[in-house]
Image (cartoon, rainbow, N blue to C red):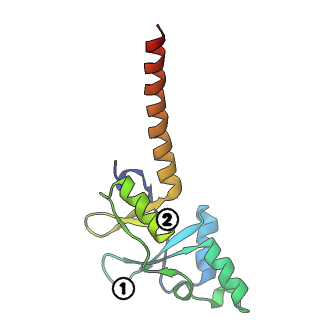
Amino acid sequence: MSVGQICTRGAVTVPLGASLEEAAGKMLEFGVGAVIVTDDSVAPPAVAGILTDRDIVRARLGHCGALSAISVAGVMTRNPLVFDANETLTNALRALRARDVRRAPVLGRDGRLIGLLSSDDLLAEFAAELGALAQVVARQGRGRQH
């Protein structure tokens, strides 16, 4: 199993020049807690950073101006962890832990953004694998009792 198989497809993006008001609006519209910031001046658009709802709250508390006056570029996490779609789940978990982050963009072979991997995606996949393993152990235990 690879990160490309379990990541959330259709990640929500905002351009590097967007305001926090625009980014917050997209988060609200799509019901997400993070957006991927893209540099659309190159082809394909490059991942420039990640912006979370928490980043917006911190920025707002630190500035007196309106969200429309604060740039995404000044608040986002730059140089985010980025995964190739073929990365293994175990390596992805290690990398997320090492960088102390919960989310990372996933790129396809051509360098295009294909999705966003979150710790929740990994948790769901690992939980399903543990559940399957528990069923095997339970079946083997029942077989020994007869």
- Amino acid at dot 2: Arg
- Residue 12's tag is none
109 versus 78 height, above or below:
above
For label 2, the crowd category at 10 Å Cα-Cα, with few meaning under 14, some 14 to 19 and many 20 or more, is: many
68, 104: nearer the viewer: 104
Image coordinates of residue 13 in percent, x first then y, are 48, 71
User: Looking at the rendering, which quadrant does residue 74 occupy?
Assistant: bottom right
Q: Secondary structure at mark 1?
A: loop
Image coordinates of residue 32 in percent, x first then y, are 59, 63
Mark 1 or mark 2: name the one nearer the start of the chain. Answer: 1
> Which residue is label 2 attached to?
103
Q: Secondary structure at mark 2?
A: strand
**Tag 1–tag 2 contact (CB < 8 Å):** no
Residue located farthest toward the top when viewing the structure as drawn: 146
- Residue 41's tag is 1
Q: Residue visible at 70% across and 91% down?
A: 63
- Choose mark 1 or mark 2, whichever is in front: 2
Image coordinates of residue 2 in percent, x first then y, are 34, 52
For label 1, the crowd category at 10 Å Cα-Cα, with few meaning under 14, some 14 to 19 and many 20 or more, is: few
Q: Residue visible at 45% across and 26% down?
A: 137
Image coordinates of residue 6 in percent, x first then y, are 41, 51
User: Looking at the rendering, which quadrant does residue 66 occupy?
Assistant: bottom right
- Amino acid at dot 1: Ser
Report the label total: 2
**In the rendered view, does 145 fall on the left or right side of 86?**
right
120 versus 96 height, above or below:
above
Residue located farthest toward the left when viewing the structure as drawn: 110
